[in-house]
Image (cartoon, rainbow, N blue to C red):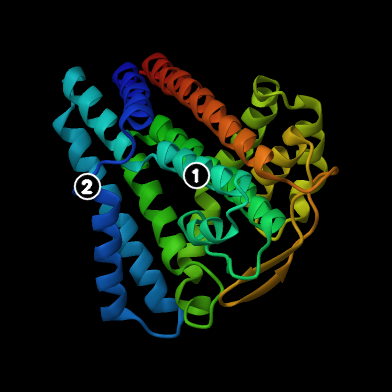
C-alpha cells in the first residue's frame, strides 16, 4: 500500500512540474469558493464560529480523502492514480516558480510597475510603496515560505497520511491564507485557521529548512551559512514556521531578509534574518532555482518516508 503511495507522490510531483496547476475545475479553487460561502453563512466576530468554519471544511476534506483511499484499498494501481491526482491538485511548486520567475524578469528589466502588479500573486503585502529592493525581498521571502507551504508540507502529509493528509493539509493551508491573518475582520474568526496551519507546518517547515541547507550548493549557495542562519535566526521570526525556511534561504543565498513589512491591514517590524546585502533580481532567480531543487528533494524524501512507514506497519503486523 505504501509503495503505491510513494509512487503516487512522485508521479503527482512530476505532473505538477510538467503541467502546472490544472487549468480548469481546480479543486483548490472550488474549495475556496465553498469556504467563502460558508464564511458568509457563519461569520461572527468571535473565535467559536471560526472554529466551526475550520472544523467543517478541514474535516470535510479529510473525509473526502478517506473515501478516496477506500476506493483504492487492495488495488495498487487505483491508489497510485488517486494519490498522483491528489498530489498534482494540491502542489503549487510550478505556479510558484512561474510567478517568481516573472517577478525576477520584471525586476531585472527595472519594470517596477509590472513587478508591483505581480506581487499580489505571491503574497498579501502592499506593493505600492515598495522599491526594487523591497519587491525583491518580498519575492524571496514569499518563494521561501511557499516552498514549505505549497510543496514540502503537502508531500510530507501525503507520505504520512496519504490522500486524507494531502487534502486535509491543503484545506488547512488555504483557510489560513483566506482568514488566518491579523486584520480587524479575522483577528478572532481566523484564529482557529491560523493555529491549525501553524500546527500542520511545525514539522514540514523544519524539514524544508534542512532540505534548503542541503540543496544550497546546487544553486551556488552555502549549505553552512544556510544551516547556521537557520539555527541562529529562525526563532526570532513572529511565525513559528515561516521564519524557519526564510532564515535558511537567507543563509543559502547569503543575503539579508526581514525588516519593515507593510500589509493592507497594518505594518509589522520583523527581525533581520541573515547577513549580507539586500536581495536583487538575481537573488530572486536563484531563490526560484533553490525552490525547485528543494521541491524535488522533498518528493524523494517523502517517497522514502512513505515506504518506511509501510515497512514499519508490516513488521508490526
Q: CA distance from mark 2 to mark 1?
A: 35 Å
Callout 1 crowding tier (Cα within 10 Å): few <14, some 14–19, many ≥20: some
* Helix, strand or loop for disc 2: helix
- How packed mark 2 is, by other alpha carbons closer than 10 Å (few <14, some 14-19, many 20 or more), is some
| Element carrying mark 1 | helix
Tell which of 284 and 248 is nearer to you.
284
Residue 64 is marked as 2
- Position of the N terminus, as image quadrant, is top left
Residue 232, horizontal then vertical, whole percent = 83, 43
Residue position marked by numbered label 1 in the rendering: 102
Which residue occupies the foreground of this view, 201 or 296?
296
Residue at the (56%, 36%) spot, across then down: 288
In percent of the image, x 52 and y 40: which residue is there?
101
Residue 154 can be seen in this image: no
Residue 251 % position (x, y)? 77, 37
Q: Residue at x 47, y 45 (%)?
A: 99
For discs 2 and 1, the disc positioned in front in the rendered view: 1
Residue 312 seen anywhere in this rendered image of the structure: yes
Left or right placement of residue 134 versus residue 316 in this view? right
Q: How many marks?
A: 2
User: Which residue ends up furthest to the bottom in the rendered image?
Assistant: 45
Q: Earlier in the sequence, mark 2 or mark 1?
A: 2
Q: Please identify the quadrant where the C terminus is shown.
A: top left
Q: Is residue 203 left or right of residue 76?
A: right
Residue 180 is marked as: none
Amino acid at each position: 500500500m505504501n509503495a503505491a503511495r510513494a509512487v503516487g507522490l512522485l508521479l503527482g510531483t512530476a505532473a505538477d512540474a510538467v503541467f502546472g496547476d490544472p487549468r480548469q475545475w481546480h479543486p483548490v479553487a472550488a474549495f475556496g469558493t465553498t469556504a467563502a460561502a460558508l464564511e458568509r453563512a457563519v461569520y461572527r466576530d468571535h473565535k467559536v464560529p471560526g472554529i466551526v468554519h475550520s472544523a467543517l471544511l478541514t474535516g470535510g476534506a479529510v473525509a473526502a480523502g478517506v473515501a478516496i483511499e477506500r476506493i483504492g484499498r487492495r488495488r495498487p494501481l487505483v491508489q497510485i492514480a488517486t494519490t498522483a491526482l491528489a498530489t498534482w491538485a494540491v502542489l503549487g511548486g510550478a505556479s510558484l516558480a512561474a510567478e517568481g520567475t516573472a517577478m525576477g524578469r520584471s525586476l531585472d528589466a527595472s519594470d517596477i510597475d509590472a513587478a508591483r502588479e505581480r506581487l499580489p500573486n505571491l503574497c498579501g503585502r502592499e506593493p505600492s510603496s515598495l522599491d526594487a529592493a523591497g519587491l525583491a525581498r518580498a519575492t524571496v521571502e514569499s518563494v521561501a515560505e511557499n516552498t514549505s507551504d505549497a510543496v514540502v508540507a503537502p508531500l510530507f502529509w501525503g507520505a504520512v497520511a496519504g490522500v486524507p493528509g494531502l487534502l486535509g493539509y491543503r484545506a488547512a493551508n488555504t483557510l489560513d491564507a483566506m482568514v488566518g491573518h491579523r486584520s480587524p475582520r479575522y483577528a478572532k474568526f481566523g484564529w482557529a485557521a491560523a493555529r491549525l496551519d501553524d500546527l500542520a507546518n511545525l514539522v514540514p517547515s523544519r524539514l524544508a529548512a534542512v532540505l534548503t541547507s542541503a540543496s544550497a550548493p546546487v544553486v551556488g549557495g552555502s549549505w553552512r551559512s544556510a544551516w547556521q542562519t537557520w539555527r541562529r535566526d529562525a526563532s526570532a521570526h513572529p511565525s513559528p514556521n515561516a521564519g524557519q525556511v526564510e532564515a535558511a534561504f537567507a543563509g543559502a543565498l547569503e543575503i539579508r531578509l526581514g525588516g519593515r513589512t507593510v500589509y493592507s491591514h497594518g505594518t509589522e517590524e520583523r527581525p533581520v534574518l541573515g547577513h549580507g546585502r539586500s536581495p536583487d533580481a538575481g537573488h530572486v532567480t536563484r531563490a526560484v532555482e533553490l525552490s525547485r531543487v528543494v521541491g524535488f528533494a522533498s518528493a524523494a524524501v517523502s517517497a522514502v518516508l512513505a515506504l518506511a512507514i509501510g515497512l514499519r506497519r508490516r513488521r508490526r503486523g
